[in-house]
Image: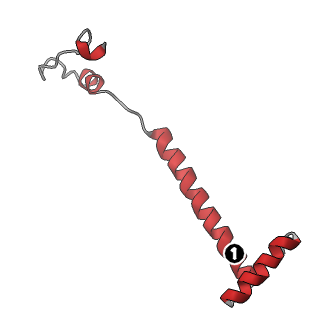
């Protein structure tokens, strides 16, 4: 059992009557929508926190491929300025 202020209760009663459902059903639906959205929000935060951007040059260096790929550093070129 949950108490809500009079204005919310009036709105719930009106909506319940229009939809021909109980106030409890409306409240449950609202809570489920909120929880679903919050779960999506938390998932987005988790995904963003595990993403890491790695430059092409760093990947080549990590695997020792910079010389084999004929890769030349862009440092000192007009692109860096």
Q: Residues within 10 Å of mark 1 (few under 14, many from 20)?
A: few
Left/right placement of residue 74 relative to residue 6 reads left
Q: Residue at x 28, y 23 (%)?
A: 62
Q: What residue sits 24% from the left and 13% below the top?
A: 78
Q: Nearer the viewer, residue 43 or 13?
A: 13
Residue 1 or residue 10, whichever sits in front: 10
Rendered position, 23 above or below 57: below
Residue 64, horizontal then vertical, whole percent? 22, 21
Label 1 sits on a secondary structure element that is helix
Q: Nearer the viewer, residue 12 or 68?
A: 12
Q: Residue at x 76, y 78 (%)?
A: 12
Would residue 74 be found to the left or right of residue 42 on screen? left
Figure check: 72 above or below 48: above
Tell me which corner region of the image, top left, top right, bottom left or bottom right, holds residue 40: bottom right
**45 lies above or below 73:** below
- Answer left or right for 73 relative to 7: left
Question: Which image quarter: residue 36?
Answer: bottom right
- In which quadrant of the rendered view does residue 9 lie? bottom right
Which residue in the protein does label 1 denote?
Answer: 28
Residue 53, image x, y percentages: 38, 32
Left or right of residue 38, residue 80 in this image: left
Where in the figure is residue 43, as x and y percent of width and height? 52, 52
Image quarter of the C terminus:
top left
- Give the image location of residue 30, x and y in percent: 67, 71
Q: Quarter of the image containing the N terminus?
A: bottom right
The residue positioned 68% from the left and 91% from the top of the image is 20
Farthest residue, direction bottom = 20
């Amino acid at each position: 059992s949950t108490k809500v202020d009079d204005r919310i209760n009036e709105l719930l009663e009106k909506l319940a009557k229009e939809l021909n459902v109980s106030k409890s059903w409306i409240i449950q639906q609202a809570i489920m929508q909120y929880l679903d959205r919050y779960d999506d929000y938390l998932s987005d935060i988790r995904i963003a926190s595990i993403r890491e951007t790695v430059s092409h040059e760093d990947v080549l260096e990590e695997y020792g491929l910079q010389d084999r790929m004929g890769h030349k550093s862009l440092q000192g070129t007009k692109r860096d300025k």
